[in-house]
Image (tube, helix red, strand yellow):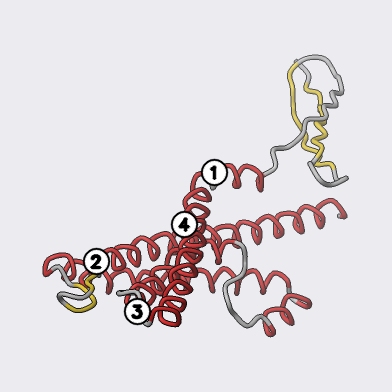
């Protein structure tokens, strides 16, 4: 039984390149050419992250809505002080608690859309000359970020338990009192979500690095 070489031409989505892979088949000599689109790995990754994106987007939307609520409360307090000389009780306490909660509710979405405050001057210089090294540094940055929020999560857990057990509150008895444990819980949840988001971004960075390395290897092999 003789062997024939069949060449399968896979058309890569988004590029004009074709990957040729030899296939040995039993039977008479023949040549088969198939144009089969390869699955887009980026779209597959986006589908896997879709459910988690709902979590970050929902938390960000709740935080944005709460900002508008704070805006209304603060303005009502200002007008009440100015017109009636009667401030609304608890506004300073609510604002002080809300600022911390808003940061941790929106940090993961801010990171996901690339708006987290950081200096990229050095990274941009490296990216122009050494794009692969820039990917490595960005992946390490996201891993370090996950580690830092893991430390925050570990330190905040005991604080949450303490606030829950002793029913810690802010304000003054007989005037205004607000429990602190909901904010501590938001810090825990926001830190956990931020850790996951950092890890997902790190996985994406190193996956893109591996893909680019494979493409370079393939190009060199094709040229030889």
Q: Does residue 151 show up?
A: no
216 or 192, which is in the foreground? 192
Residue at label 3? 86
Mark 2–mark 3 Cα distance, whole angstroms, equals 29 Å
Mark 1–mark 3 Cα distance, whole angstroms, equals 53 Å
Residue at label 4? 62
Mark 4–mark 2 Cα distance, whole angstroms, equals 18 Å
Mark 4–mark 3 Cα distance, whole angstroms, equals 30 Å
Residue at label 2? 181
> Mark 4 or mark 1, which is nearer the start of the sequence?
1
Image quarter of residue 148: bottom left
Instruction: Give the vertical position of 48 relative to 131 (above or below).
Output: above
Q: Does residue 120 show up?
A: yes
Image quarter of residue 76: bottom left
Residue at label 1? 48
> Mark 3 or mark 2, which is nearer the start of the sequence?
3
- As helix, strand or loop, the secondary structure at mark 2 comes to helix
Mark 2–mark 1 Cα distance, whole angstroms, equals 33 Å
Mark 1–mark 4 Cα distance, whole angstroms, equals 23 Å
């Amino acid at each position: 039984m003789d062997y024939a070489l069949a060449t399968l031409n896979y058309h890569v989505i988004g590029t004009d390149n074709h990957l040729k892979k030899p296939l040995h088949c039993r039977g008479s000599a023949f040549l088969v050419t198939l144009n089969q689109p390869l699955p887009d790995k980026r779209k597959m990754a986006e589908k896997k992250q879709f459910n988690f994106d709902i979590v970050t987007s929902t938390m960000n939307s709740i935080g944005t809505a709460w900002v508008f609520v704070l805006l209304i409360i603060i303005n009502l307090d200002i007008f009440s002080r100015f017109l009636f000389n009667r401030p609304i009780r608890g506004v300073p306490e609510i604002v002080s608690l809300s600022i911390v909660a808003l940061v941790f509710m929106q940090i993961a979405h801010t990171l996901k859309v690339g708006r987290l405050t950081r200096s990229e001057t050095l990274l941009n210089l490296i990216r122009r000359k050494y794009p692969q090294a820039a990917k490595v540094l960005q992946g390490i940055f996201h891993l370090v970020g996950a580690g830092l929020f893991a430390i925050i999560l570990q330190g905040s857990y005991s604080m949450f338990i303490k606030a829950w057990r002793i029913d810690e509150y802010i304000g003054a008895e007989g005037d205004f009192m607000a429990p602190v444990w909901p904010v501590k819980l938001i810090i825990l949840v926001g830190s956990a979500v931020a850790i996951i988001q950092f890890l997902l971004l790190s996985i994406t960075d190193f996956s893109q690095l591996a893909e680019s390395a494979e493409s370079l290897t393939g190009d060199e092999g094709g040229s030889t």
